[in-house]
Amino acid sequence: MSADEQRMEGGLRLAAAGPLDPALFAWLALLLFAHRATLGLEGVHATADPIERFFFEAGSTVPLLHYAVFALIVWRRRLALAGADLVGREGQGTSPYARRLSGGLVMLLGAGLVTWGRATGQLDLLLDALVLSIAGGALWRGGSRLLSRFLLPLAVLWLARPLPPFWVHALHEWLQTWTGLVARLALSPFDAVVQSGHLMGFRGHVFQVIEGCSGLRSTLTLVFATLLYADLFSRSRVQTVGLVGLAGVIGLLVNGLRVIWIMIAPGSTLSEDHSMQGLVMIVLGIVLLATIDVGLDRRVWPRGDRSWRLAGAALSPRPTLARLGRDRWWGPLALASVLAVASCLPLDLERPRPEIWRLHEIGNEIGAWRAVRVLEADYRHLGSVDFRDKVHREYEREGEHVKLFVGSDDRIRRDQSLLSPKTLTEGSGWEVEEIRSVRVRGFAVPVDRVLARREGERAVSLHVRLGAGGPLAESLRWWLALDLRPGRSPAEIAVVRVTAPVRDGDRVGATHVAEAFLRDLAPVLDRAAPASLGVALAEPATP
């Protein structure tokens, strides 16, 4: 059989298969209904303007928009889905038993995650469960071929999920530094640029590269738009992956141009209207992406197989109930129906109260140290880093001064966290020169010794996070909402920073002052800490 005859036969078989299979859309509709609570996903908003939040706040998400684009892409791919479904039903590719076993396991995992998400009250887990349920149903029905057709719409859906806040803090810090460096390199040939941390001085004005200027949210928005663009223009999987990579680079470059424009023309209308900036950035990003894509499509990109999109559906008969049973949609449909019914049942579990840090134990007198003033936190520097409670004071002893910062978080708000590199320094303009893990005599756990500078000033800080694990452990703990499971009292975590100024270049002397204060602070922290901390911070004195 020639290639043309094979293509014609494939198109006729596709038409006979019924690309408008109601079982497919009934299954998706049941799953979306069962997970409808995800429409309530929202983060902490620093601004009231929804457009500004959408473009610049990493914690902001609009699930309804992602659902709408998901539905649009699935509708546009209905012929491709029917074609992959046909191949799977006829036994080509993955064996039927392997399909149903793997698909059933993934669907059960999704159902378990739904139950866990409802038990912990975490809507973001329901979004993960929805993605798993759709992926499992695709595996059950059509194996890896059908699943591959769902990858792009599932990626669009999953982008509605909030990222772990401590990941966001780390990305913000890196991108703020990178954006400031790009602006300084671009503007230095024209005039002097003074950079200190995230503060930028240019032509008599001082600018701060805040979290909204990092480009994280706008880049994620451009990636989201790129996935829709790839589907609208029928790009292959290789092309789509390449376009997503380009979108990441273009998003950061366009954000750098935005910051440069604000520094050049701080009084312009565009510099003051953040919503307009976001719209200009996304339009410029898409135009640049499309221009590059057209050039690559002609010379570099491999041509994808778009034959399923070209197949006609005019001869498609309406599938009967007998066909639906024969085609074995019963598994995904049955599980989706159970989830839809269960989502209507009330599940009101008692939430345990967290074990909190009693920061009132940290008084104005700590050993021989006396508080001389209360300090204000630099919220422009901290950005989205947040605390349930905090203590920020300056203490003095015989002419020696230290600044103490203690902040706690109860882990109940999953869209905020105090785990951030921003707590290493005092505020705006400070840059970390050196960071090293050390042991302090009289303090039971290792601490980070941080040397920082700002416009001729230098300071030594002893920084420690209490009750928190490593990056992997914290990521798993957050993703699975382990601190919010019923019957468990979540334990607060705390960050402690003791800062001593470096005088006359004496780093060693400043370190000794900070260590002396930390030793006196240790028994106070033991009284303030919850029992779940599980370690005494004050070590017994040794001769």
Image (spheres, rainbow, N blue to C red):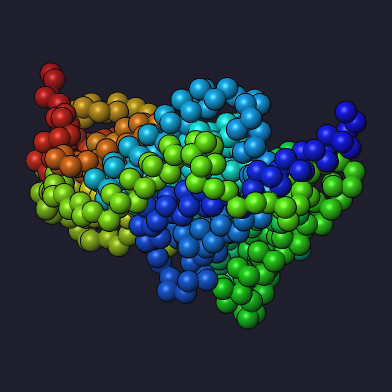
Looking at the image, residue 71 sits to the left or right of residue 478; the answer is right
Residue at position x 77%, y 43% in the image: 11
Looking at the image, residue 170 sits to the left or right of residue 144; the answer is left
In this view of the protein, can residue 385 be seen by the observer?
no
Question: In the picture, residue 387 is in which quadrant?
Answer: bottom left
Residue at position x 63%, y 70% in the image: 279
In this view of the protein, can residue 340 be seen by the observer?
yes
- Depth order, front residue of 256/331: 331
Question: In the picture, residue 106 is in which quadrant?
Answer: top left
- Depth order, front residue of 331/344: 331
Residue 527 locus on image (x, y percent) = 9, 40
Looking at the image, residue 352 sits to the left or right of residue 290; the answer is left
Residue 470 locus on image (x, y percent) = 36, 31
Looking at the image, residue 253 sits to the left or right of residue 381; the answer is right
Quarter of the figure that contains the N terminus? top right
Quarter of the figure that contains the C terminus? top left
- Depth order, front residue of 266/131: 131
Residue 351 locus on image (x, y percent) = 16, 49
Residue 119 locus on image (x, y percent) = 24, 45
- Depth order, front residue of 247/264: 247
